[in-house]
Image (cartoon, helix red, strand yellow):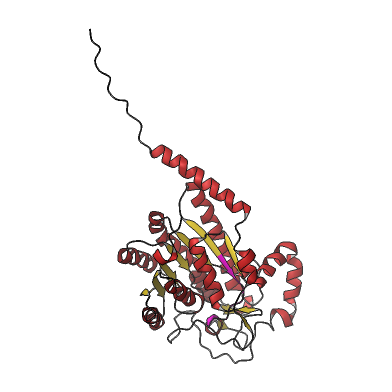
Amino acid sequence: MPRPVAEQVVVIVGASTGIGRATALEFAAKGARVVCAARGTLALETLAQQIHRDGGDALPVPTDVADAAAVRSLADFAEQHYGRIDTWVNAAAVGVWGRVEDITAEEFDRVMRVNFLGHVHGVHAALPALRRSAGTVIGISSAEGVRAVPLQGPYTASKFALRGFYDCLRMELAQDGSPVTVTTILPASTDTPFFEHARSKLGAMVKPPPPVYAPSVVATNIVYAATHPRREIPVGGSAVVFLLGQRLSPALSDALLSVRRVGVGSQRSDRPDNGLDNLDRPMDGTGRVRGRHPGWVLRHSAFTRLIGRRRRPGELLTAAVRELRQRRRSGRRRPAVQRAPQPAAVR
């Protein structure tokens, strides 16, 4: 059983802004010791200061997730400092908006290095410590890991890759009887600075398509998964619409999103692009949780709370496979019972 959140050591990669920052604040508010990692040094420092002011315990560690050695150092430092790692959250992401033919190979490469390989590096670095603590990996994919959206080719491809990656990891750990669990989070559109920090080739700054949720809605479900591991948690009713649309009629979804008013108009804001992005280097600033979405932002998701968090029957079967494998392994490790020496026969 996972430790209570108040007793956990949590590493959050991508903690400087948005969902990652909201998650760090949520974990710290519940008593967890939080290791905050991202490229933006100043943003991490202000995050740690805020947590300390509120009576929490946080450790900022500047880290580029695209650097495998840096992520390994992060994991080693966190375990040495706090003694263990109970939960590892992979939340770092960057984005480029534009038509596939207008996005360069170098831009595709950079998005995949951060959004996909950054998660791979995190898993490789964290697994030894998580095996020792019987901990959990929480990977932030997206509703776009289920259903593609036009103008987001690199981002959508990276999120599809993440979903498959975490599925493979989950099955392999169950096969081994490992105590480590894996939860994939699938957020819908969220009001974070991600859209202001993305690189845009649309001639304007991009925006999240409606309906839009507050980052705290996603953070609450990430914290929930730290003590209630689930295969996947879709966050927001629109995330479920994506899942159902892709399952029932992907061709119809293609047709709807091919309409410019829907596929393009819902993502292009009225604000001019300022030419700044965090694709290759972190943005300056102290870091923010919320973006500047001008429209309505939903602060709750009844669907996720009542249905999205439910454990599916297949998850119980996977847990049974893991448990059976654990019993077999423990049985093989049990030392053979030695029979007591018999007294010599009296002649």
Prevailing SS of the magenta stretch:
loop
Q: Position of residue 290 (x, y in %)?
A: 53, 83
- Residue 335 vs 208, above or below: the answer is above
Q: Position of residue 18 (x, y in %)?
A: 51, 79
Q: Position of residue 345 (x, y in %)?
A: 25, 12
Quarter of the picture holding the C terminus: top left
- Residue 307 vs 287, above or below: the answer is above
Looking at the image, the residue that sits furthest to the top is: 347
Q: Is residue 290 left or right of residue 286?
A: right
Q: Is residue 126 left or right of residue 274?
A: left
User: What stretch of residues is rendered in magenta?
Assistant: 185-194
Regarding residue 326, the answer to whether it shows in the image is: yes
Q: Kindly indicate the quadrant of the structure image that contains residue 12.
A: bottom left
Residue found at x 71% / y 65%: 244
Nearer to me, 155 or 314: 314
The answer to if 192 sits in the magenta stretch is yes
Residue found at x 52% / y 66%: 224
Residue found at x 76% / y 72%: 255
Q: Position of residue 270 (x, y in %)?
A: 64, 91
How many numbered tags mark residues here? 0
The answer to if 155 sits in the magenta stretch is no
Regarding residue 66, the answer to whether it shows in the image is: no
Nearer to me, 322 or 167: 322
Q: Kindly indicate the quadrant of the structure image that contains residue 39.
A: bottom left
